[in-house]
Amino acid sequence: LFQRMPNIKIFSGSSHCDLAQKIADRLGIQVGKVVSRKFSNQETCVEIGESVRGEDVYIVQSGCGAINDNLMEMLIMIHACKIASASRVTALIPLFPYARQDKKDKSRAPISAKLVANMLSISGADHIITMDLHASQIQGFFDIPVDNLYAEPAVLKWIKENIIEWKNSVIVSPDAGGAKRVTSIADRLNVEFALIHKERKKANEVDRMVLVGDVTDRVAILVDDMADTCGTICHAAEKLLLAGATKVYAILTHGIFSGPALSRINNAAFEAVVVTNTTPQDQHMQQAERIKTIDISPILAEAIRRTHNGESVSYLFSNVPL
């Protein structure tokens, strides 16, 4: 009997339809039909509009916007595909929700990232593809395979193409946690790195900062995995200019930009704030013209293609697909 190869089916949650469309275009397929609506009591109802029996299903949903609704919608979509006999269901989560709640930093604190991991596994996901996890140990919260892709190759490409004086730059981490990410980029560009040590009194508010390293008469490039309220990076930019940097760029994988973030960016002294489109950026770009985006849909599309064909994904850790 001839065994049919499963087809790729891509379904989009309501958090980032544009990204799903770009991924599907890149793979030369259509986004699957799915209707997501809410009952009058606000329960989420998802209807998958085409057969997924025996197919290789990818569900694209980012942890942005109405995070809890989107998370629940994704769990319901995974479950719906699983019980409709999909051969494999992969959750493609460019921005992993609750990734910052990954340890007990004080008594009685929840480890919500672990809870989200459990929920994804229980709902029936067979594989997770995500990007620049806040802490890579989150991969260990799952018993299913997790591919944590990096925006780094795309960031290196952007720096080389858009910052003329990149050879006289210094890559700066706005906190000690991102030091590894920054040293890796600095090594690949063959430039110096610096880091800023910050102390937090309470979440989302920075108390004081100390710069370690020399940025005098150089272009400072701040690199971090996410910018939420942007307090840290705006503080850091001031600090770098005071320390003698000629220009300051910020490059962040996930531009969440909640609360006062956009007004802070407009008032800060950045040349550009570069983010990827793991979350929708169109509205942010209208409100702050300094925000520039890097399209990471080719990386995600290539990860899907390689996963589907059973090829290695590690090529993407150091190369941008053409």
Image (cartoon, rainbow, N blue to C red):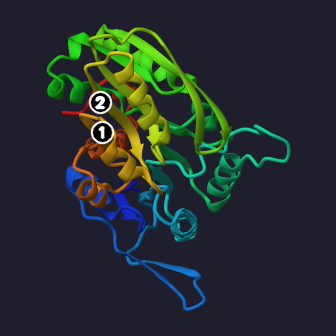
Residue in view at x 19 percent, y 22 percent: 160
Q: Is residue 131 visible?
A: no
Circle 2 Cα neighbour tier, 10 Å, few/some/many (<14 / 14–19 / ≥20) = many
Q: Name, please, the residue furthest toward the front.
A: 242
Q: Left or right of 311: which side holds 295?
A: left
Q: Quadrant of residue 104?
A: top right
Q: Which one is in front, 300 or 271?
A: 271
**Picture layout, residue 274 above or below residue 192:** below
Residue 314 percent location from the top left of the image: 40, 26
Residue 273 circle label? 1
Question: Are the two marked residues, 1 and 2, in contact with CB atoms closer than 8 angstroms?
Answer: yes
Q: Which residue is mark 2?
A: 249
Q: Name, please, the residue furthest toward the bottom.
A: 40
Residue 90 circle label? none
Amino acid type, label 2: Tyr
Say which element carries label 1: strand
Q: Name, please, the residue furthest toward the right.
A: 107
Residue 107 percent location from the top left of the image: 85, 42
Residue 30 percent location from the top left of the image: 25, 64
Residue 112 percent location from the top left of the image: 69, 50
Residue in view at x 69 percent, y 52 percent: 118
Circle 1 Cα neighbour tier, 10 Å, few/some/many (<14 / 14–19 / ≥20) = many
